[in-house]
Structure formats: C-alpha cells, structure tokens
Image (tube, rainbow, N blue to C red):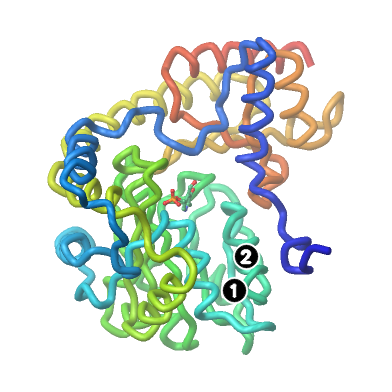
Amino acid sequence: MLSKRILNLSPSPTLSLDAKVKQLQADGKKIINLTLGEPDFNTPEYIRIAAKEAIDSGFTHYAPPAGILELRELISKKLEKENGLIYNPQEIIVGVGSKQLLHSVFQVLCEDGDEVIVPTPTWSTYIEQIKLSGATPVLAPLLPPFKLTAKDIEQKITPRTKAIIINNPSNPTGAVVEKTELANIGELAVQKNIFIIADEIYEKIIFEGSHFSVGSFSPVARNQTITINGFSKAYAMTGWRIGYAAGPRDIIYAMVALAGQTTSGTSSISQKAAVAAFGNDSEIKLMTNEFRRRRAFLFVELSKIDKIQVLKPEGAFYIFPDIRKLFGGKYNSSAEWAIGLLEDVEVAVVPGEAFCAPGFIRISFATSIDNIKEGVRRITDFVLDS
Ligand code: PLP
C-alpha cells in the first residue's frame, strides 16, 4: 500500500530513542536522558517578546515562500559579516528548520543514480533524505579524531558524484574541519564540478579555534556551495522551526518554487522572532559558556573510566566516546551496550550505529550539570559491574 520510497525510509533513531525514554519516564522511571539534540535552555525572552508582538499586531498571515524580505536582508548581512559570504536576499531562502531545507536541496539537485558523499560518523537524516531524492549516499568513513580532509572525499568521487556534505562542527563527533582543509575541499569541488552542501547549524557552539565557511575561500567555491544554517541550536529555538539556506540563484529559486507547492514557507511569527534573535548575541555567549563548563566536566570524568576512550569535542554539544574495549563479555555492540545501560542504570545515550559508527556512543551535554554528574556516576558503576 505504501510507496517504495517511504518503505525504504528509516525513522530518526534519536527521535525514536527519545520517545522510548519519554515512555519510560511516564511509567515512573527516573531516567537520566543524555540523548537530547536540542539546548535545554528556553528561548531568550527578547525573542519571545518579538513573537508575541507579531501575533498581537496581526502579523499572522502567509509569508512569502522564500521568507520575509526583512529577515533575508538580515541573513545576507550576517553571512557577509560573520562568514565572509556575499549573498543578496534573492539568493537566500528561509524554511521550516534547516532539516526541511536540506531535504529541499537534495530534491532540487539530485536525479536517480546520482551519488552524494557523506563523511561518517554522520547525522542519519542526510542519508535518509538523499535516498528520498533518488540519489545514493556514499559513505566516507573517518577515523578518530574525525577531522575531515579533502583526501577523504577525493577517494569517493566517481563520475556520478553530485555533491558532498560537510557538517561543521559535526553532529555527533564535535569535530571542526581545519581551515586549510576547507579551502582544499572547496578547490576539489570546483575541480570535479560537484556541489558542497555545508550544514553550519552548530556554527555558534564552538569551543576551540574559529568557525570558517567552506564557501568563503573563493568565489568559484562559493558558486558551488549551498550553506545551510538556522536558529534552533544557537538561539534555543528548536520548536519554532526556522532555518535558512544561501546558494546560487537558480538553486534557491528552485527551492522557493518547491516551498511554494509544499510548505508555503515557515511561520510568519517565527520569522519575526528570528529578526529579533539577530539583534542580540549575548545569550548565545552565556549558553556556550555553560556548554563549555559541562564539556570540561564530562571529558575529565569519562577519561577516568577504564576502557572508554574519549576525545574533547571542539564544537556542538555532544561527546562521542569509543567503547569498543568494553566488548567481548556481556555486550558486543554499542546498541546492546546502550540497551543494557538504559535497563540496568536508567541512563539513555545514543549508540554509534545511529551515526554509521558502531563501537561509539553519543552523549549529549545539552542537559543540566546535575543530570550529567548523575549520568556519569551511573555509567561508571555500570562499566564496573558489567
Ligand atoms: N543539522 C544537524 C547536523 C543537526 O544535528 C540538526 C538537528 O539535530 C539539524 C541540522 C536540524 O536542525 P533544525 O531544527 O534547524 O531543523
């Protein structure tokens, strides 16, 4: 009855796990949830006020499918000032979160039989969205510390390669791509005539060094790059469903046409909230400082656990330990280990299988320091007992 396309789709592993945790919590279990992919902070007040003003002033009608001009002008200024990317508002689209815009990019770029290179460990959404477009995801596995290089990509290029994904900083590893490698990847894309899809959603949550946009290194690289970003992670606005993409005009026009026949753009109220968000970055600094404090604590405490190997993430709010040395006894995979952890000590983490990286687990520090302390204590006990 259902289409092959949808039967072929795997549900989001993190969202499924989150649903399971919520069910256990509803049953009265005191689960420590370290799976979360969203800031635990509330949206800052000045943003909420702007949304209320939008509602009260009647700014509640359809917005243009490309997004309101006022917001696209601000995005254009932001990209120039912070990312060294020159895009006019006609080369920018606002959408229903960066997830929907990624889906739209694959839909407008890919034909059946095309290939899209996905460095792994990776966020599983890319793989499913590429499959939905008719293209084939081609995995490019990285080894710890998971720093992407142009060579990793070059090895996977074939005549059918249409695009590559760069998620910088990375979910789930927290790795940040080196500036020189970004320039090399840009050159490679130009030389091989392939697109770069740059997902920069964790841009503002960065602890070491600086963030650079891959499209900023040369005008030709810029012409083959679609940069995706949004408000969810930086401004704690996950539920508002608002993100944006900037890229070559014909690609953005195609995405606008697709939005016109599917979503009709995103909420007008969220767009006014996003306009306000751009006016003030002070709360981002507070949130990032809190993430930094939690990261330091988790890194030190996890490093003390025998047989768990841990790298310090440079960005995002996840730590991605290697637990392979724990296998051979009761557990032989991250998926089994994560179920044991949940059942025995009631701590939820995401197994690496969800990111094409068996042998690892993802621990989110987008939760309170008290939860993190208790979570690490229980993980330590679990490792000692199993
Ligand atoms: N890109 C990555 C790498 C993510 O981890 C996420 C959310 O988990 C998104 C995009 C989606 O963000 P949005 O809320 O803007 O759709």
**Residue closest to the far right:** 329
Going by the image, does 340 lie left or right of 224?
Answer: right
Q: In x, y percent, where is residue 161?
A: 59, 82
Where residue 90 appears, as percent x and y from the top left, is 24, 77
Residue lying at 54% horizontally and 11% vertically, measured from the top left: 374
**Left or right of 370 in this view: 115:** right
Q: In this rendering, is residue 201 above or below 382? A: below
Give, as a three-letter code, the residue at label 1: Val
- With respect to residue 9, does 341 lie above or below? above
Query: SS of the residue at dot 1?
Result: strand
- Pick whichever of labels 2 and 1 is earlier in the sequence: 1
Residue wearing tag 1: 116
Q: Which residue is mark 2?
A: 140
Q: CA distance from mark 2 to mark 1?
A: 10 Å
Amino acid bearing label 2 = Ala
Please state which of residues 118 and 7 is positioned toward the viewer in this rendering: 7
Picture quarter with the N terminus: bottom right
Residue at 79% across, 63% down: 2
